[in-house]
Every structure is written in structure tokens, then in C-alpha cells.
Amino acid sequence: MSSIFDFVVIGSGLAGLSFAIRASKYGSVALITKGKIEESNSFYAQGGIAASPLSDEDSVEKHIEDTIKAGDGLCNTEVVRTIIEESKQAIEELVSWNVEFDREDGNFHLTREGGHSARRILHKGDYTGQEIQTKLSEIVRNQKNIFIFEENMAVDIITKFKFVGRKGGEVEDECYGAYILNKRTGSIETIFGKFVILATGGAGKVYLITTNPDTATGDGVAMAKRAGAKIANMEFYQFHPTVLYHHKEKNFLISEAVRGEGGIIRNKNGEPFMKKYHPMGELAPRDIVARAIDMELKKSGEDHVYLDITHLPKDFIIKRFPKIYQKCLSLGIDITKEPIPVAPGAHFMCGGVLTDSYGETSISRLFAIGEVAYNGFHGANRLASNSLLECVVMSKRALKKCLEYPKKIHIPQEDIPPWKSEKTIPQDEKILISHTWDEIRRLMWNYVGIVRSEKRLQRAYERINIIKKEVIEDYWKYYVSPDLIELRNIAITAELIIISAMQRKESRGTHFNIDYPFKNDIDFKKDTIL
């Protein structure tokens, strides 16, 4: 069984939903999502969305400067300017979609996070992502031209070179659709699309400790790599400095806005230490704060540090951070009276599928937007709260380029074989999947984490090759299941991160190698492209 749509959107975060809403005016949209459309990385974004200028103290130029500074020499200045210049329009569009942001005296209440030189972040309490995701999901569910495939996950992208073949000296590949697994029935269907948009988010589950939900398994990057698309800058994985450290909660984020409002990071003795590492202290860029905490933990032998806001008024804390307050209180921590135990965790994939300034990949009519993509906006390190902005602007630009293509696009459906799985046998050994998954995550955390070395990277590379071989053998041997698909994607994504990290013989942005502790602009002020 197969279906054909004008647009096939894989992923239902802010990038995917905003693209689907816009594209539904121009054609049919298939929206593929592993769970419910409300579930995504975007949903868990606490801090907010950055835009400029929204106050007299800010400007587009200041925002550009902060973004490029955080990107540590690898930002594409053209892309940075384009996205930030469109930021106010992006906010207006979100408001037109009924998204509400906190206001004060009629104006947007703006907060500040690490790396920002001015208050420019709009928010809804400390659950901005939830507000945006909920409002856009409501719109999507009421659009007749959007066909929602929940509990479905992409298995592989269908391309010309892979399934039809090259002709003569052809060098440009084309995308025709994707194979999709229905998680309820176990069947794999072919869904054709004139345009395929990867909006699958990040890959935090590659690491042992992460702020990401269980769905963040690097699916888009791994599928794009298998299809032959170019991948860039995977060595730059951003670690959020402050993940709640508690045995009953594995990935709850303590927003950077807590530090933006005056939160102080303290060691086990209650001493603040960030000024020792950077003049901006708690408001230094995330990579610096995460490394500082990592160094303090290694020195003390402790598992966590503390984020303290007890010096702020109780009413302000409860009103400004209601979700964080309630979550911590449910675990027996009253953040108005005691500091919050925190530790760094994998947070955001700064690299991804290489695209142009409109989100198109090296494969024609295959687009990547949001966290799955690398377009040069973030460079070597993402500036806080720039990610939601990128999603809204790049989804709009991607649609613009789609609409510039000829209206008649031929998809050779007769040449694309249906998915075959007759030769497979049931996968009864569930323990093999869970054990291998755990092994990859521990390997990445210990050897390819916040601080790296040549020896650690080499050991990780040798081990991931063995693991990946085992995973691929199992993949072609057993029935295809969601767990097996995600395990394959995790293994491939981990390998891409390791290979990229091995190629960069310097320390820049989120990539820190103790054997090459300094930046080398002569040899490495460039993207790592695989």
C-alpha cells in the first residue's frame, strides 16, 4: 500500500508543525510522528524564544553579535542575519496562531539567558515550548489538508540513486518519499512526497544523561546519512549545565532563565565559583558553564552542584517558574528555601544534516529544518533560546523554496519497490536491544562527553564500529520494530559524532579536547563535513 502527498513532514515539533500549517494552504501534507503530535523536544523548551529588537536596549545587530560570539567562529553570518532579521515577524506569526507570551504593562515580558547582552527572550512562565506546541497542535488537528500519522515512524528515505539508480553522469540525487512503520500494526508502508521535510529534532538519547525525551534518537540524521546526504559539525553537541539531579527524575531541565533572573551556581560548600571561569559568571555561554561544573565535580568527586535562587522573593519565584517550582516541590525540594541539585546533561545537537539557507539538503527536494539541520546559524555552539526562533523562520524559508519548484514533479512510483520483510524472524531477545542501547549511551557519556581526549575518542571509535556491525546484522535478521529502528539510528548518530570529534584537532565551542585545548583558526575555522 502506498500514498502520495505534496509534502511529507517527518516530525511534529515546532519546525514540523509550523511548516505543515503553512504548507497546507498549497497542497496535501502528511505529518508523520512517532507518538502524538503534541510530543516533541519543542514541548519541553522552558526558557523561551529570542527575537530582536523588542526593547530600546536591544537591536538586531546586538543579537547577531551575541549569536556569532556564541558560535565561536563557525556561524554563517548570512544565515544568522537572515534569521534574526525575520525574528519579529516570526513572533507576530506565533501570536496570530494564538500563542500567548507573558506581558507586563501591556508589553512582552523579556528575560535574559547566558550569552545574551540584553533582555530579548519572550516566554510563557517556564513552559514556553508547551504553550507553543499545544496551540499549534490545535491548529494542525483542524486543518483538512493535513493528514496526521501518529504512532508512525520513518524507517528510511526513498531516493533516486538508492532505489531507481543513476543515469549517465548524474550527480544530483532526488528524494521521492519514505518508508513508514505503523507502530500499531507493524506494517511498513510507502509514502511518496514531492517534498520530504525532516523535522525530527535532536539525538539526546545518544547520551546517558540528557534533557531530551525518549523520542530524541537521531532518526533524521541517521536516515539522511544512509540516503547519502551530507552531514556537518556533529562534534558540537551542547550540554545544558543545569539538569535536575534526582534519583526519581531522569531528564527534567532547570531553565537557563533561572540564572538569567539571578540564580547562583554553588559547590557542595555553598561557594559560588563561576566567576573563576568566566567574567560573565552564571551568564557565560552554556559550553563554558557546563565545563566549569564538570571541572568542579571532578575536583570534588561529587555528583552534582547547586543552583540557588533562595535570595529572590518567594512570590516572584513561584510566578516566574511555576513548573520548576511544582516539579521540585513534588520531589521534596522547596526552591524558595533550598538550592536545586543540578548536573550537566546532553541538550542540543548543534550539527546535523547540512542544508542551504532555505533548508534544502544535498539531495534535491529533501529538506531539513530545526534541530536535525545544520545551516550555519548555531556554528560551534547555540545561543540560548535561538532554537525555537530558527524553527519558525526556517520552516517558512523551506516552504518558499518548495514553491519555487515546477508544479509538475514526476515520482516514478512504479520503480520503487514495496518494503519486503519475508526473510526476517521474530526478535525475542529484547535484552540485546536494551543492553546495546545502554552500552552506546555510557560509551558516549564517558568518552565523547563534555571533555574529550584522543585516547577516549579512539577507544570510542573502535567500540562503536563493533556495536554498529552487531546492530546492523540484527536489523536485517529480525522483524523491524520501533526499538530496533531507534537502536540503529542511535548507533549511526553516535558514530558520526565520534568521527567528527576525531577530525577536529582543537577545542572550539562545545567541543573540548584536553590534548588540543586551544582554538586553531588556521586549520580548523571550518565546518566538519561528512
Image (spheres, helix red, strand yellow):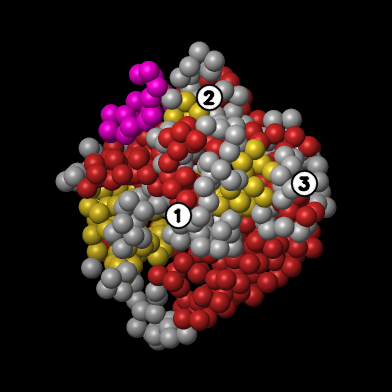
Q: Earlier in the sequence, mark 1 or mark 3?
A: 1
Q: Earlier in the sequence, mark 1 or mark 2?
A: 2
Nearer the observer: mark 2 or 3; the answer is 2
**Going 30% across and 48% down the picture, which residue do you hit?**
7
Report the residue that reaches farthest toward the left: 144
User: Label 2's element?
Assistant: loop
Compute the Cα span from label 1 to label 2: 31 Å
Look at the numbered discs 2 and 3 and tell me whether their residues touch, using CB distance below 8 Å. Answer: no
Residue of label 1: 330
Left or right, 169 with reference to 35: right
Please state the horizontal and vertical placement of residue 268, each as a whole percent of the image. Answer: 72, 50
Of residues 342 and 26, which is closer to you in this image? 342
Total number of numbered discs in the rendering: 3
User: Label 3's element?
Assistant: loop
Of residues 58 and 338, which is closer to you in this image? 338
- Residue 222 visible in the displayed image: no
Of residues 256 and 325, which is closer to you in this image? 325
Q: Name the disc covering residue 273, or none.
A: none
Kind of residue indicated by mark 3 = Glu
Compute the Cα span from label 2 to label 3: 33 Å
Look at the numbered discs 1 and 3 and tell me whether their residues touch, using CB distance below 8 Å. Answer: no
Residue of label 3: 506
**Going 73% across and 54% down the picture, which residue do you hit?**
297
Residue of label 2: 119
